[in-house]
Amino acid sequence: MMFALADANKFYASCEKVFRPDLREKPVLVLSNNDGCCIAMSREAKRLGIKMGMPWFQIKQMQLPEQLHVFSSNYELYASMSNRMMALMEELAPRVEQYSIDEMFLDIRGIDSCMSYEEFGLQLRRHILSGTGLTIGVGMGPSKTLAKSAQWASKEWPQFKGVLALTLANPQRTAKLLSLQPVEELWGVGSRIAKKLNVMGITTALQLAQANTVFIRKNFSVVLERTVRELNGESCIALEEAPPTKQQIVCSRSFGERITTLEAMQQAVCQYAERAAEKLRGERQFCRHISVFVKSSPFAVNEPYYSNVSSETLLTPTQDTRDIIAAAQRALERVWRNGHRFAKAGIMLNDFSSTGVAQLNLFDEQAPRPHSQELMKVLDTINQTGLGQIWFAGRGTAPDWKMKREMLSPAYTTRWNDIPIARII
Ligand SMILES: [Mg+2]
């Protein structure tokens, strides 16, 4: 086997820079939902001493030698850039697995019969850069874990120029790299396991690779045993071309401002229900179980904390937004209490099936709605292709319910009105 892992550098911050060439060498920061804290930044921002997770109000007070360019998170833009990047990678490798929004595993077996792995990595990098303006790092190895380690090293040491291949033909090179990689930086090793390993004297990836597999299985798990085998070049984790279907969909959010009226909460829940239903259709699933939860802030002083959840089970599995909104509103009415200042709410869909034709109850009067599938298709097509936005009146008049996004960049790649204009001087 031979895998490549391609990973975009500083993905969110780089997406913001692609359409703003004036920011190329400037410090760029991306904030979490509701402009809460820093979730991504460019190299230049990191150099200024900003840390991931720092609250925005704190960053604002810092005395910096340079102007900071700050953006609210623009997931519409990031998802679209991610799609472009993935499509470009698929052009160069027949079997691929999207691992996260900015990472992809590629099956590159046999590529070395026409070029070296390094050449392939450089070619992939150029291809993505010219097609999207994004820079990727490429790590390659005979197992997914080794490809991940190579990718880690390609970022850690600039002399690799973002491309590094580990092969079975050169075990000394692999051993050298693994001796420099702390065990907590390994793919699939969490901080809790890393601590336990450290106590046992295993601090580097090489020491873990040399550990006895029986000992590891006994003291940890088969999962970590698999990591040990993978580090030794034995591929145990296969490429997952089709990701497993989700078993649960959650849509929730903290509010920009507290919610105190039932009407406002109904609007918010309506919006989450719409989004959850759309995701459900995207997974080609139907659901029967719908829960709604509401919470006040556990940190508020002089306020009683209140949190509750309620569920509805439908007789017939559905993927129709109208059924999901109706069920969510019934559940909401049961958990709503006047007098609280709500900070967060959400909806959860469970009990999935791949078809809506459940056993109909003989006396059931809630037959499926006529033309439901066609109507939902029209809805999704309009909303997803940029033709326009339609939503249910229950959401109120705000197209996106009251999220604080004061520094949002345009939807350059997904909205006609936001398309960047190039001026030639
Ligand atoms: Mg990345």
Image (cartoon, rainbow, N blue to C red):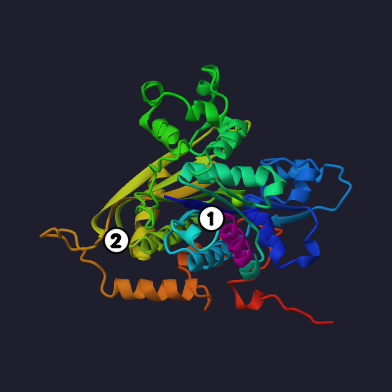
Residue at position x 78%, y 80% from top?
A: 423
Q: Which residues are magenta?
A: 117-128
Q: Position of residue 422 (x, y in %)?
A: 75, 78
Q: Which residue is mark 1?
A: 101
Residue at position x 61%, y 78% from top?
A: 416
Pointer 1: residues within 10 angstroms few (<14), some, or many (20+)?
some
Q: Which of the 4 image quadrants contains residue 229? A: top left
Q: Which residue is mark 2?
A: 318
Q: How many labels were placed on the picture?
A: 2
Q: What is the spatial separation of the Cα atoms under label 1 and label 2, in whole angstroms?
A: 28 Å
Q: Can residue 336 be spotted in the picture? A: no
Q: Position of residue 146 (x, y in %)?
A: 51, 42
Pointer 2: residues within 10 angstroms few (<14), some, or many (20+)?
many
Q: Which of the 4 image quadrants contains residue 184? A: top right
Question: Going by the image, does 169 lie left or right of 72?
Answer: left
Q: Nearer the viewer, residue 10 or 250?
A: 10
Judged from the image, the secondary structure of the residue bearing numbered disc 1 is loop
